[in-house]
Amino acid sequence: MGGAGGGGFGGFGGFDGFGDLGDILGGMFGGAFGGGRRRTGPQQGDDIGYRVSITFEEAAFGVKKEISYSRVCHCPDCKGSGAAPGSRAETCSVCRGTGQVKRVQRMGGMAFQSTAPCDNCHGTGRVIQNPCAKCRGTGMAKEVKKLTVSIPAGIDDGERIALRGQGNDGKNGGPAGDLVILVNVRNHAIFERNGINISCEVPLTVAEATLGAEIEVPTLEGNVKYNIPEGTQPGTSFTLRGKGIPSINNSNRRGDLIFRVTVEIPKGLNEKQKNAMKAFADSCGEVNYAKHKQFFKKIFGQK
């Protein structure tokens, strides 16, 4: 996974000298205008992307994960030189270690001097007479690396963690790239997340909603008791402060748990239960069903 950077453009940047113009023309005419690039300088290693999947609770409270991944590193046999143990790379006699040679190309009666990668050393500035058997003279090899990654509390689905210098090793003394971990948080069976707050639905029986009751409400740390008031209506929401997700930016701040109650209507009543329900309904006057009364009053104009 490579990093990308964006920069500003001051004025008409890119045409402030013949060097930049030469780079552009060099790209068009194969280096005839001085657009060659040295390969002997330090080159940063590539970033590596890694995806890790964690549970809802692990995202809330943090977790350590053991991971293993493949990366490109300096060859352990030749220590990155590319030369077999006991030998060493020699400075290229053609380009004298610069990795570039000068050429003269004539176009339309004019002579243009340019630089291009040296064919003898392929632009590296070095010639290896006895290449390392393990890396075949490249100086680089593959390895499987194991790490323990600390995933912070409060991380959300799709967020990334960058471990500096844990990507592919650089070349010619360049720094290593990064290991970029993309975090995937699995859905929870009960809770949904909105920022640092979480929510869920809790079903009540008709009796609990009507008479009020002490119920158990699930949280990320186990059930807690909560007193539902008498006459609670379906869809009513209640809040448990500080029972949500910790803030990833402020360890002292934590979200809330908001639960919404639903009222479950019983099914499959026997005759005795039905008669009891009818008797209960007959015993209730309009004063017990204010919304019911107001609704039909608006429709039929009842007093």
Image: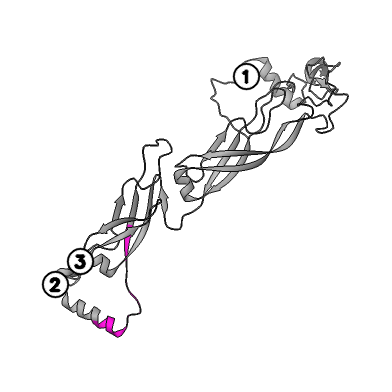
Residue at x 36%, y 48% (from the top left corner)? 243
Image quarter of residue 154: top left
Mark 1 is surrounded, within 10 Å at the Cα level, by few (under 14), some (14 to 19) or many (20 or more) other residues, namely few
Residue range corresponding to the magenta coloring: 260-275
Q: Which residue is under mark 2?
A: 302
Q: In which quarter of the image is the C terminus?
A: bottom left
Left or right: where does residue 301 sit relative to residue 275?
left
Q: Which amino acid does label 2 sit on?
A: Gln
Foreground of the two, 110 or 221? 221
* Distance from Cα at disc 2 to Cα at disc 1: 84 Å
Q: Where in the figure is residue 62, as x and y percent of width and height?
A: 48, 42
- Seen in the picture, residue 157 relative to 296 is either above or below; the reply is above
The answer to whether residue 1 of the structure is visible from this angle is no
Residue at x 81%, y 17% (from the top left corner)? 101
* Helix, strand or loop at mark 2: loop
Foreground of the two, 170 or 208? 208
Left or right: where does residue 300 sit relative to residue 101?
left
Image quarter of residue 274: bottom left
Q: Which of marks 2 and 3 is nearer the N terminus?
A: 3
* Distance from Cα at disc 2 to Cα at disc 3: 13 Å
Q: Which of marks 3 and 1 is nearer the N terminus?
A: 1
Q: Which of marks 3 and 1 is in front?
A: 3
* Helix, strand or loop at mark 3: helix
Q: Which residue is under mark 3?
A: 291
